[in-house]
């Protein structure tokens, strides 16, 4: 399981020109799954995201979590996180989990994270347009 975490001032996801979800201050997650991922990784990474201290405290030091600042999470499924371009120029996605299995894990991850912080999803498998106003920029890669 891989998650790209981006601290955001404002972000939104649209499908076919229609707004699906949006957040003000918070985190945008790009979430991908691979063979062997399970609920163990889901719980571990949901806790990690909720407690990741990448928001500024009063001294301007990244010492606060999303729980401390009261933001929201925009969670976007992204199988391309498992793209492998080591051979040639066209990435292979064979390491990405098949969509029928990945959607179950994606929904479980969002439900688990939602226990900590309001989590708004994109639409799994859709052609999404994601606008991210990355704050910092702060981008962290988490993997389990």
Image (cartoon, rainbow, N blue to C red):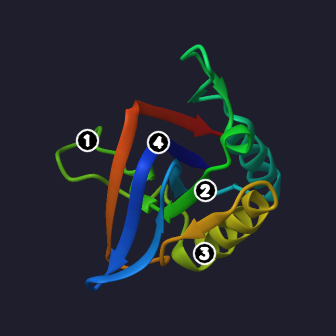
Question: Disc 2 on helix, strand or loop?
Answer: strand
Question: Disc 3 on helix, strand or loop?
Answer: helix
Which label belongs to residue 103? 3
* Dot placed on the residue nearer the N-terminal end, 4 or 3: 4
Q: Are marks 4 and 3 in contact (CB under 8 Å)?
A: no
Q: Which residue is mark 1?
A: 87
Cα distance, mark 2 to mark 1?
38 Å
Position of residue 117 in the picture relative to residue 106 (left or right):
right
- Please identify, in this view, whether the residue under mark 2 or under mark 4 is nearer the observer: 2
Question: Disc 4 on helix, strand or loop?
Answer: strand
Q: Which residue is mark 2?
A: 72
**Label 4: few (<14), some or many (≥20) within 10 Å?**
many
**Image coordinates for residue 144, horizontal then vertical, percent:** 67, 40
Which label belongs to residue 6? 4
Please name the residue shown 47% across and 42% down the image.
6
Q: Nearer the viewer, residue 2 or 65?
A: 65
**Image coordinates for residue 1, horizontal then vertical, percent:** 61, 49
- Please identify, in this view, whether the residue under mark 2 or under mark 3 is nearer the observer: 2
Question: Disc 1 on helix, strand or loop?
Answer: loop
* Dot placed on the residue nearer the N-terminal end, 2 or 4: 4
Please name the residue shown 58% across and 16% down the image.
61
Cα distance, mark 2 to mark 3?
21 Å
- Please identify, in this view, whether the residue under mark 2 or under mark 1 is nearer the observer: 2
Cα distance, mark 4 to mark 1?
28 Å
Please name the residue shown 55% across and 46% down the image.
3
């Amino acid at each position: 399981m891989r998650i790209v975490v981006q601290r955001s001032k404002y972000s939104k996801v649209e499908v076919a020109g229609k707004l699906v979800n949006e957040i003000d201050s918070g985190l945008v997650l790009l979430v991908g799954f691979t063979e062997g991922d399970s609920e163990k990784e889901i719980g571990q990474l949901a806790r990690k995201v909720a407690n990741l201290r990448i928001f500024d405290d009063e001294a301007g030091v990244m010492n606060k979590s999303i729980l401390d600042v009261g933001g929201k999470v925009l969670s976007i499924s992204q199988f391309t996180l498992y793209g492998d371009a080591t051979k040639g120029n066209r990435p292979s996605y064979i390491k990405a989990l098949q969509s029928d299995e990945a959607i179950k894990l994606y929904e479980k991850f969002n439900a688990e994270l939602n226990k900590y912080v309001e989590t708004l999803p994109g639409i799994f498998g859709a052609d999404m347009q994601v606008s991210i106003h990355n704050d910092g920029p702060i981008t962290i890669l988490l993997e389990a």
